[in-house]
Image: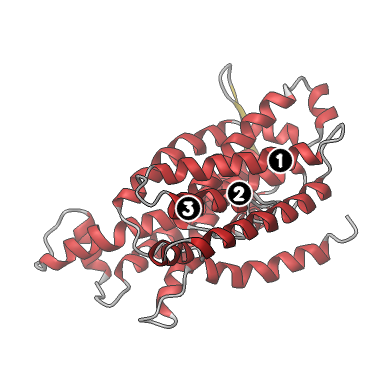
Amino acid sequence: MKQWLTIRNPVLSFYVDRRLPATVAILVILGFIAFTLNVGKGEYPIAVLDILKTLFGIDTGNPDHLFVIYTLRLPRSLVAFMVGLALAISGTIFQGLTRNPLADPSIIGINGGASLAAVATIILFPAAPIYALPLSAFAGALVMAALIYGLAWNRGSSPILLILLGIGLSAIASAFTSLLITFGSIYDVSQALVWLAGSVYGRTWEQFFAFLPWCVTGIPIALSLSRQLNVLSLGDDVARGLGSRVEWQRGLLVIVAVGLAGASVATAGAISFVGLMAPHIGRKIVGANHQNLLPIAGLIGGLLVAIADLIGRSVFAPIEIPCGVVIAAIGAPFFIYLLIHNRHS
């Protein structure tokens, strides 16, 4: 039986791995299970059946369920999954564009630029509206991406140089972030420190609706450009030979990836390694074709953050560990493994 299902018409042309529908279904089921456990877990535990009844508008006989689920836990769980989804798709795009399996928004400095801009907004403009944070983080991430690509460009982009420059510029951004924290007020600094650890603690519908437009806009654009990403990942010369508008397509993909990463950082703080791990896991399942990899990596990323948030709330309860710390505990060894595995590349 053929592994690929080909769909062609004047509007769409793409190859779908026959494993894709089953894989998507499994990941959606796992995501829903993690989501349900997240909503039910806490100092006030709620049974799964009561969660489902509340979500579908059925009276459970306990008025507290409605408040706990819809006000306290549902927005947090949705934000966790969406942040993982956005970071994973952003990381997949950067790995495809740089042709480097080590590329990730946190490693190549994109998250560092977003964090610096967001912390500056929190400390210098504490009265700024919630919608200003994603915009400032996007601006910081975009400036950092422009610096990295500009400094690394020499008749082409060197994948290794992109990584090294990203690490260096990320360290500089981190130093300026620490400087801002040193001179900030106690209240603003405490808020920034919790946020920098990477956490969805206390996320409300306000943060959810501030983040939603970035996902609704960026993710469909990324999926629609997956075919172009396949071509660009072959190299500029090959892409031009195939008739691609390399600079325009790369620029659009960078803007989408930066927007998703910046908005994620603004919403949940500096959660690292999701954009590194999710694409690698996805390639093991459906291969390197970005038309299949982008949705699978996105779902894996959402699942990773949702599970990390659940673990962080459960292991040392009632003390909560930020989900960013949980993911870093897994992602850092994974990054070292990739460095060793690709040392001769």
Q: Which residue is mark 3?
A: 83
Q: Is residue 222 left or right of residue 231?
A: left
* Amino acid under disc 1: Leu
Q: Nearer the viewer, residue 232 or 175?
A: 175
* Amino acid under disc 2: Gly
Q: Residue at the spot x=32%, y=55% of the render?
A: 75
Pointer 3 with pointer 1, Cβ within 8 A: no
Residue 167 spot, x, y in % from top left: 73, 56
Q: Is residue 83 above or below residue 335?
A: above
* Amino acid under disc 3: Val
Q: CA distance from mark 3 to mark 1?
A: 25 Å
| Quadrant occupied by the N terminus | top right
Q: Residue at the spot x=58%, y=58% of the render?
A: 177
The residue furthest right is 344
Q: Nearer the viewer, residue 118 or 238?
A: 118
Q: Which residue is mark 2?
A: 113
Q: Is residue 68 left or right of residue 249?
A: left
Q: Crowdedness of circle 3 by 10 Å Cα count: few (<14), some, many (20+)? A: many
> Disc 1 or 2, which lies upstream in sequence?
2
Q: Is residue 239 above or below residue 3?
A: above
Residue 267 spot, x, y in % from top left: 44, 52
